[in-house]
Image (tube, rainbow, N blue to C red):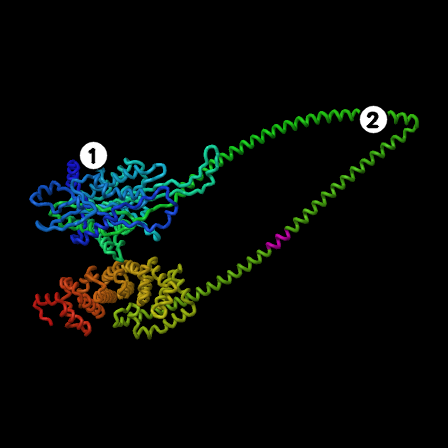
Amino acid sequence: MANTATNYRNYGSNNGTRSSLNSNKSSSSSSSFKSKASAANSVSSAPPPRRSSTGSVNALKYDPGVPGRVRVAVRLRPRNAEELASDADFADCVELQPELKRLKLRRNNWDSDTYEFDEVLTEFSSQKRVYEVVAKPVVESVLDGYNGTVMAYGQTGTGKTYTLGRLGDEDTAARGIMVRALEDILSEISPETDSVCVSYLQLYMETIQDLLDPSNDNISILEDPKTGDISLPGATHVEIRDQESFLELLRLGEAHRFAANTKLNTESSRSHAILMVQVKRSIKGRDSAVSNENGDKSHMHRTLKPGIVRKGKLVVVDLAGSERIDKSGSEGHTLEEAKSINLSLSALGKCINALAENSSHVPVRDSKLTRLLRDSFGGTARTSLVVTIGPSPRHRAETSSTISFGQRAMKVENMLKIKEEFDYKSLSRRLDIQLETLIAEHERRQKAFQDEVDRLSLEAQKRIDEAERNFADALEKERLKYQNDYVESIQKLKDQWVLHQENSGDGRGKASVISASEQVTEVKLLLEKEVSIRKRAEEELSNLKYQLMQRERSEAAGSSEILKLRKTLESETQQKEKLEEEIAILQNQLLQLSFEADKTRRQLDQNGDVEVPNGIDSPVSQARNQQLQESGHGEKASVAKLFEQVGLQKILSLLEAEDPDVRIHAVKVVANLAAEETNQEKIVEAGGLASLLMLLSNSDDETIHRVSAGAIANLAMNETNQELIMAQGGIGLLSIAAANAEDPQTLRMIAGAIANLCGNDKLQMKLRDEGGIRALLGMVRCRHPDVLAQVARGIANFAKCESRASTQGSKHGRSLLIEDGALAWIVQNANNDASPIRRHIELALCHLAQHEVNAKDMVIGGALWELVRISRECTREDIRILAHRTLTSSPIFQGELKRLRIGYN
């Protein structure tokens, strides 16, 4: 035990680990919370039920999951050499009670706070003990098919990396959770049927980098829209077969991790390390239809059922710690790294707070770290968190922050779900083997049958040959017999004929008989030959008639097909000519309308903008004054006529035309149509809003951006359309367009659209989270008075909605405008020479000052003097009265005025 403590102490002093998040302190000493934590601990301490490998297939149906709270253990690091020297006269700031699973954090010498955790590990706890109580239940769940997460959180130098990533090359007892977890996993799996794949990543400056392939330094995150699962398709996946290869991967990954030397840690990691282990286990099927060696097919009648594959994923996260710059001494690039670390840990803390309070909105998209850990907190994974602390009283604030983080994490409930599916690949392989066996058996039997047929054929052929020989011999004997009989008969006939001749004495009769016989025989042969030639000629004539008939039919069918094709071609040609005429007419109308719109706009620019008194006006509605009505009457008539003749769908279809001029003119027509309130609903229903947003996203033409933003600004005057614009990512596209635009008119249109969205109470948080306020403040770089007027209008609308929400009790805390740094620009332009800018800024200041929580920031920012000036010099009486009432009702403002000896009543 002493040896373990010594190694642990040396690691903490020499190598160091990560810095902890400087979160707000929260006390958990109340007895009610302890009872709830104990009850939750008793419920979640039991591991999820293990599934039997011979269970029913019905187990793969929808599984609602098993509830499981995040388990949190706290581990104390012993004092290192520096603390033994500098803090020798001071007691430790924490006191552990491991048997009661409690720790006490001293406030002073006579008072302390008590906290309860799932496990309390002293400075003498071995690495094996830490693994068994923190990570082993998670590893067992992963082997059963669940997702699991083990995460270390704590101040730099408290032993996070020692706890998780220690390799134990010199002393195997010092091995960390990563090495021990893989050792258990490899011992439980079967190399023939199971697999283990490892990925090792780091999150550095909000970019995900592959520690196993340093060239892969910008990995994207993909989220399954159906299941919500997070995947990293660009990461390297290495299949692990033995422990030694895994240790080599860990060494390779640690060599590529970013680290820096700070005052708090000589090797302070500047990134979050994430080890992902994917375990795939095959469970043997219940009914296997395999025939035996003797060819027995009785098993083949059983129903084939596939096996089950369980897929578990283990995620081990070694978090970097947040830094207090005054303690760490970071500067330059190291300071930028510290800012990035602080932002990601702050986002993680916000998610933990939201989950602990059962908030309806959890800001998981604020950071890539929270997106990667989405399944670990509030998801389907079994999660264990070990918070590491140090005993030094100098770092009591950091220790308190770490303990508070762990206490909040204990309130997070996950819903554990098993990940399993049918092993159709294994079933397919088994069926392939069976099929090959059956084919081989069939071929063997077929070969045996063919051999038997060949044998019988050979035997039959032998018998046939023997019978033919016997028959030939018998036939030859018969032929010789009959030939002999024939010769004898001829000889007898000749003898008789000679005898007859001698008796008749007439030799001429013989010659005439022979000649007649020969003539008859020749005539018969000629007749037979003529008959055969005639039959052949008749057959050839029939064939020729049939071929001629087939050719005539094919020619008729071909002529009919050619006629149909000619008719189709003529119809398509006519339709094409008609469409080309319609397109030419439409282009001419668009060009004429565009020229009229440009002429009207130039006249309007020469006459100047007319101030509109209401607070939710847009760039297009600003120009809707008497001069525009007189000069643009013809343009509106042309738009209405075009709308009636052509139709909205055809106009919207031209937004996707390849000709850029046609596309620009079509956008202008849609913008003019959107200026009329009666047309806005039709444009949105026909898909016009989606087309305009697509143009903002895909087009590089600033003219298209300007006119599209103007049309969106007009549509944004309707509350329903405002929600649709936000839902389709409109604020993000407008922000990107604002960042890339240089033309003041384009910026004015974009600022007007965002200003209209700022006037919706329901969209305040979403508009701010997606960069709407930052986009408005970014456009002040233009310095054009029209752009500044729209920015001021948007800020006034936002401040007015915030004031209304605070009055109704739905918003608490400082103004989001102040948090985003808008106060300095508001104060700077409160007395602007341009009347529209000054009016909106004065109204925004009055709305911000109505709530006492903003008063201190406004006094520091110099807004008090502007409020006094507004209450005395503002030309609008309602704003002047509002400023006076605000100054007199605010205790902070009154106290500051008295301190400065300014009389005001």
- Whether residue 556 is in magenta: the answer is yes
- The residue at 37%/73% (across/down) is 634
- Badge 1: few (under 14), some or many (20 or more) residues near its Cα, within 10 Å? few
Residue drawn at (70%, 47%), measured in percent from left and top? 541
Residue 578, image x and y in percent? 48, 64
In the rendered image of this protein, does residue 381 appear above or below residue 511? below
Q: Which residue is mark 1?
A: 170
- Examine the image and state in which quarter residue 11 appears: top left
Q: Nearer the viewer, residue 17 or 75?
A: 75
Q: Quadrant of residue 537?
A: top right
Q: Which residues are magenta?
A: 551-558
Residue 870 at x, y = what percent? 16, 70
The kind of secondary structure element at disc 2 is helix
Above or below: residue 564 compared with residue 254:
below
Q: Amino acid at mark 1?
A: Glu
Residue 376 left/right relative to 668: left
Q: Residues within 10 Å of mark 2 (few under 14, many from 20)?
A: few
Amino acid carrying label 2: it is Ser
* Residue 201 placement, left or right of 861: right
Q: Are marks 2 and 1 in contact (CB under 8 Å)?
A: no
Q: Position of residue 435 (x, y in %)?
A: 47, 38
Between the C-alphas of marks 2 and 1, the distance is: 126 Å
User: Front-most of 516 and 844?
Assistant: 844
Where is 374 relative to 594, above or below? Answer: above
Question: In the rendered image, is residue 661 in sight?
Answer: no
Q: Quadrant of the C terminus?
A: bottom left
- Mark 1 lies on a secondary structure that is loop
Q: Identify the mark at residue 489; answer none if there is no mark.
A: 2
On the image, the x and y values in percent for residue 442 come to 51, 35
Which quarter of the rendered picture does the N terminus lie within?
Answer: top left
Q: Is residue 708 magenta?
A: no
